[in-house]
Amino acid sequence: MFHLPKMAAVAVIATSLMVSAASAQTVLRSSDTHPDGYPTVEAVKKFGELLSAKTDGRYSVEVFHSAQLGQEADTIEQTQFGVIDMNRISIGAFGTQVPEATVTQLPYIFRSADHFHNVLDGPIGEEILKAFDAVDVVALAFYDGGARSFYNSEKPITSPADMEGLKFRVMQSDIFVDMVGALGANATPMPYGEVYSAIQTGVIEGAENNYPSFDTAGHAEVAKFYSLDEHLMVPEVLVISKVVWDGLTPEDQALFREAAKESVAAQRELWVAKEVESKAAVEALGAVINEVDKAPFIEAMKPVYEKYVTDPKLQDLVARIQATEG
């Protein structure tokens, strides 16, 4: 998927930029799998408004929501190649290709929303954003993806034993697969857009995600049991193709970064409101929500940490994240 030849893409982008220069505006296409109105979609729109204001209208952003340009795994490569200009992607969709980002996918690495924000808003967050340069995209900012928990069509999950034998959809990430396996369940990687029908037809029993996704994708209609183990707080990341980025002036690159950072506050505000709204919506559908004692789940993750945190640099990164207040 990564490090594809880019000569053709460079030519296409260069031509596009020249045409846009003639019309005094460059319209950047940005992809998102979520529906219109979703906090990440609205945040990228906000980024576009800020960018347009900062560049006196020379740049604007058109957001293609609802996976119009493809599912995340497909759009990553298109963004790297410069076919898609920008993308809002869950870090989990990058799998283990960015080692520093892999650390943020470790189960229970973040203790709370405050801890999550304190880590990503500081030097550790900047270090992780910079690491994306190695895979042909430039990461501009982190958005909030909320806490992910397990949900299924069979029963409440109160302990790892309750997961034995159940099939859960996960993103195409080795860590997610091993996380589910460590809890005694079976992981089934599949695109987000296929989850509803897979649960409905019994191909899988459940999945794992945050309240807004559980709600807006309709999964609460087919999987009534939502168990708050909050195993992951996986950041969303706003990226721009390096092909496009390299065509910007240093001054414009700075404005892009400013606009992205400023859009974060709006996204977080929208996210909090959406979580409240989605929790009420799934409860109205009859979803059964239960608290979970996280201790045995955290204990079960030791083999996952041992497998993925072997490099001393990553061990240091994990230690610095765990030492961050929050």
Image (cartoon, rainbow, N blue to C red):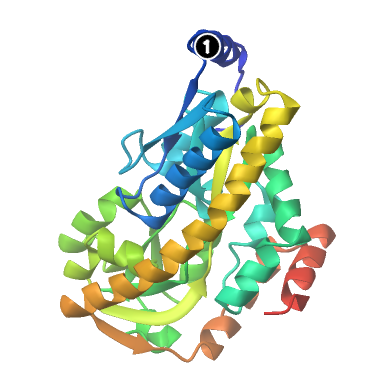
Q: Quadrant of residue 208?
A: bottom left
The image shows residue 66 at horizontal and vertical percentages of: 30, 44
The quadrant of the image that shows the C terminus is bottom right
> Residue at the location (42% across, 38% down)?
31
Left or right for 271, reference 138? left
Looking at the image, which is closer to me, 133 or 98?
A: 133
Looking at the image, which is closer to me, 189 or 254?
A: 254
> Residue at the location (16% across, 75% down)?
285
Decide: few, some or many residues near mark 1? Use Cα within 10 Å; few <14, some 14-19, many ≥20.
Answer: some
Left or right for 206, reference 149? left
Residue type highlighted by circle 1: Val
The image shows residue 132 at horizontal and vertical percentages of: 67, 42
Residue 293 visible in image: yes
Q: Secondary structure at mark 1?
A: helix
The image shows residue 50 at horizontal and vertical percentages of: 53, 41
Q: Quadrant of residue 200?
A: bottom left
Residue bearing mark 1: 12
